[in-house]
Amino acid sequence: MTKYLTLAMLLLFSFSTQATQTFSDPALNGKPTPEGADIALYVVDTASGKEIYSERAEQFQQPASLQKIITGLGARLVLDKDFRFETTMETTENDAIINFSGDPTFTRTHLRVLVEKLKLKQTTIDGNLYLNGGAFDTSERAVGLPWDIMGVCYSAPSSSITMNGNCIYGKIEGTSPAPVKGLKASGSPYISISADDIIIREGLENQNIDCDLKLTADNKNHFSLNGCVGSHRLPVNFHLAVQNTTLYLKEVLQEELDRAGIRLRGKIIRDDTATGTVIALHQSEPLMKLIDLMMKRSDNLIADNLLKTIGRVYFKQPGSYENGAAAIKAVLKEKADIDLSRAIIMDGSGLSRNNRVTAKQLMQVIQYIFSNKELGLVGTLPVSGQSGTLRYRSSLVNTPLSGKVTAKTGSIYGVFNLAGKINTKSGKSLYFVQLLSNYHSNSDNRNVARKPLRDFERGFYERLFNEH
């Protein structure tokens, strides 16, 4: 698979423009609106539940990371608030087993501690060391995930066997000072990376349409870079998604066994049925801490691993994207009377381009979260100018909006979403959902491309703040 790294980083750039959307509310027409964008808006008074504004609120749109609001609520309703992912070291007469549960925050340091605890019991494993990843099924990519971002760290595979976020580093740099004549690639010792076919361009030549870095990765964690790079960009650092999580873990684990002085007579083998007697246990942070990280950082791996865990716990079978989505729909209807039967949920993170939801459906989730403060989810949402993905969102960081908006953001290619609550000048508060898609600027300058989006958001939310 080929990865277009520039597009993965500059998600909003393209080369087409269309007419500006006409709004049903005359007060919005004539305002600076993103040209060609498809905008759905829904605003409700928090006290009365009265609809303040509705624009295409029943049109299905891509939620992007607003999907995490649904995932967070589903997790809170299915899992205990003190739920923790557990990773265990187990033994039998001859073998050792590490049983993984999909902890998205599990690190090599945690693995080392488990190995050290095994060493306290024995310094030789006469049989094999088994890796049990049976908590999830073996499908680690959601349907609808674009092939061109699968090598990028933010789309790391959702696996029961997870370590260090399933991310590794890589770099390409010149073999000499300018003018650069050649390149060399380096990276984590658990991958191989080559950059033999990259064309080097000097100065503004790299603005050519055919100057783009491309990445190919295989199931043995080999990455190949080709395409084109401007010499002024060197060195280029990458955060790459591990493609084979089991192979990665095996290699690291063998090093940790050697480091601890534990002799393994057999092999390290993946076996999702292996069990033994637990001799050591690692627990993640509790659920609410994980949801807080997911919401404020918009962490995709936490979201997808939580979705699968919801499916595993609810249906008592290995977690998957499919049973996780089914569980969320079922429990939100059972416990919150939220009907998402017509919503399309393909993952927990919002990375799948197949996800579809309406502003009215999302509004049900927003209202429930803010109306049921005992769930603790309100505090996990970013606040404008203060925390998370809203800390530096330029449309909301200045007076009068700084500190007045509590909301989740959602952005993928051409999508710029926001949903939450705004406290107004009069002391009232409003719930809102903004679904903005199909925005494509004809500028490849990030600041220029995003200016219409910033102007639209600032104008819309300042109007809500001042007039209600």
Image (cartoon, rainbow, N blue to C red):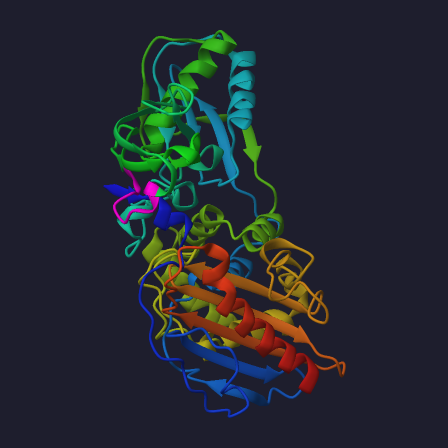
Query: Which quadrant of the rendered structure holds the N terminus?
Result: top left
Number of on-image labels: 0
- Left or right: 446 in relation to 207: right
Front in this rendered view, residue 250 or 61: 61
Front in this rendered view, residue 213 or 209: 209
Q: At which x and y percent is residue 238?
A: 42, 35
Residue located 72% across and 69% down the image: 399
Whether the magenta-drawn stretch holds residue 243 is answered as no
Which residues, given as a range, are shown in magenta?
Answer: 205-215
Q: At which x and y percent is residue 375?
A: 63, 63
The answer to whether residue 238 is visible is no
Q: At which x and y percent is residue 33?
A: 48, 77
**Picture quadrant where residue 356 is located:** bottom left
Q: At which x and y percent is residue 427?
A: 76, 81
Image position of 98 with respect to 386: above or below: above
Query: Which quadrant of the rendered structure holds the C terminus?
Result: bottom right
Front in this rendered view, residue 9 or 117: 9
Image position of 55 with respect to 438: above or below: below
